[in-house]
Amino acid sequence: MNKIQSSLVSYGLETKGSRDYMKEAEKHLPGGVAANIKHFSPHPIVMEEGRGAWLKDIDGHWYVDYLMGYGALGLGHAHAKVRHAIADQIFRDGTCLFGTPHQLEAEFAKMIKRHFPSIQKLRYTNSGTEATQLAIRLAQVFTGKRKVAKCEGHYHGGYKDMLYSINPPLDEAGEMALPLPVPESADVKVDGNEPYILPFNHIEGIEHLITTYHRDLAAVILEPIQAGYIMADQAYIDRLRQLTLTYGIVLIFDEVKTGFRSALGGAQEKYGVEADLTTLGKVIGGGFPIGLVGGRSDILDVSSPSRGADVFEAGEKGKGSAKDILFHSGTYNGHPTILAVGLATINEMESSYAKVLDFTTSLRDGIDTLAQKRGLPVTTYGAGSIFNVIWKEDCKVRHYRDLQNTNTKMRKELDFALLQAGVYTKPLNRYSISAAHGKEELEFTLKAYEKAFHQLKEGAEIS
Ligand SMILES: Cc1ncc(COP(=O)(O)O)c(C=O)c1O
């Protein structure tokens, strides 16, 4: 048995509590999980405690956490500012839910607008998924057009309109410049309602698709930094901005991952480009569920109840019809506790961001150098406080199709070796850094990498 196989065997032995729990959970939850993303083979690790940059599993192992709630935890686990913000809001206000307007709604909006100059007005949602859904609806009503274009390899949440070509098999995905829509869920079909699929970082591809289909194209939505770690060429973003302006198409930057991470002002700050609509989520809730859509007032205002009657007021004298406005609502939108936590989180991130970037640079440099020393084809890719570890001979990654040529098998082996050395991210997932990561975590992680690289190199030589 080589070293690689033995690391999977010992994974099974060391995470026995997790394996047993998952067997039990499968009796009650499909696949044993509350969200499909939590699942991985042979079984996920079940956590029971989180503190600062660390997570503890139910078998008693501690891990430096780089998943950070898929990037949602900008300050690490249960930062003191977060704990106090929860208590302060509830004790000060006496309730955690008014069901009426309250002052934090505008205060939080002002903070977001300071970082995102393209945002004039905004609406809150309860998740990133809801935010992109609302952004698309706003664009459709504003332009009077129906179709949407999204990029191949980009994720915007789990609903039918957007579950196309996120991770498509290349033999179904058509040509690079003209990708085909590939369904990503059992309830999704190519039946005329699917989005157009744009190639990321391919200027001729977007020029062709947008000039051909602009008449029925309401919006282009994309992750301006793919998966939070693959930057677009400046020329691509500039051309996309130009084309969407020329043809009256709403440009939506989905910055659920990149907001307050690739820069405090997200990818827009990095590229110096303003989107028409921006969606945010994850870190802005400091670990609690939130999303928002912000952007041009003239677009956001199509959902304003002061323009007419909404569904609850229809029929009131002189108010017009519910069809005059875009209905958007939600019991928990603008939740006081979540806005208080989000505000405290972003305030703290503003002062800790430089330190977070320093940590990210040191960790990435450390990993790159260790890989080079061992002669392993491993390179980190990223922007701001997010990066990923790519196992690829020529180390060039510019879009989804380049990712298909990376060695995911070896990356997984690396992930399992790291899990056993006490470094956590979901296998194949990106790394998100928080303000809680410091010198101790850096040294610990680089030691774990040294050990894992050594193990993989030896394993590769033996097998
Ligand atoms: C770019 C992007 N958009 C939308 C979403 C959906 O957000 P949520 O999981 O909060 O619904 C995600 C989640 O990972 C995301 O990364």
Image (cartoon, rainbow, N blue to C red):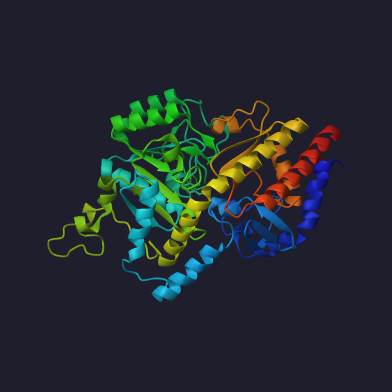
Q: Residue furthest top?
A: 204
Residue 459 in the image: state x and y as whole percent.
82, 37
For the C terminus, give its image quadrant: top right
Query: Is 432 drawn above or below residue 172 in the view shown?
Result: below
Q: Tell me the residue at 50%/58% (across/down).
A: 286
Using the image, determine if residue 54 lies above or below residue 246: below
- Name the outermost residue toward the left: 318
If the image is split into quadrants, where does the N terminus sit? top right
Q: Residue at x 54, y 53 (%)?
A: 74
Q: Is residue 257 rendered to the left or right of residue 424?
A: left
Quarter of the rendering containing residue 73: bottom right
* Horizontal side, residue 154 vs residue 422: left or right: left
Q: Residue at 49% across / 61% down in the picture?
A: 288
Q: In this orientation, which residue lies closer to the viewer: 29 or 7?
A: 7
The x and y percentages for residue 232 are 48, 32
Q: Is residue 11 left or right of residue 28?
A: right
x, y percentage for residue 462?
86, 34
Q: Nearer the viewer, residue 195 or 9?
A: 9
Please give left or right for residue 166 compared with residue 54 in the image: left
Let me know if residue 47 appears in the view.
Answer: yes
Q: Nearer the viewer, residue 346 or 245?
A: 346
**Residue at image coords 65%, 25%:** 394
Residue 76 figure quarter: bottom right
Residue 448 locus on image (x, y percent): 75, 46
Looking at this view, is 141 or 454 the one in front?
A: 454
Quick check: can you spot residue 40? no
Tell me which corner region of the image, top left, top right, bottom left or bottom right, holds residue 436: bottom right
Count of numbered tags: 0
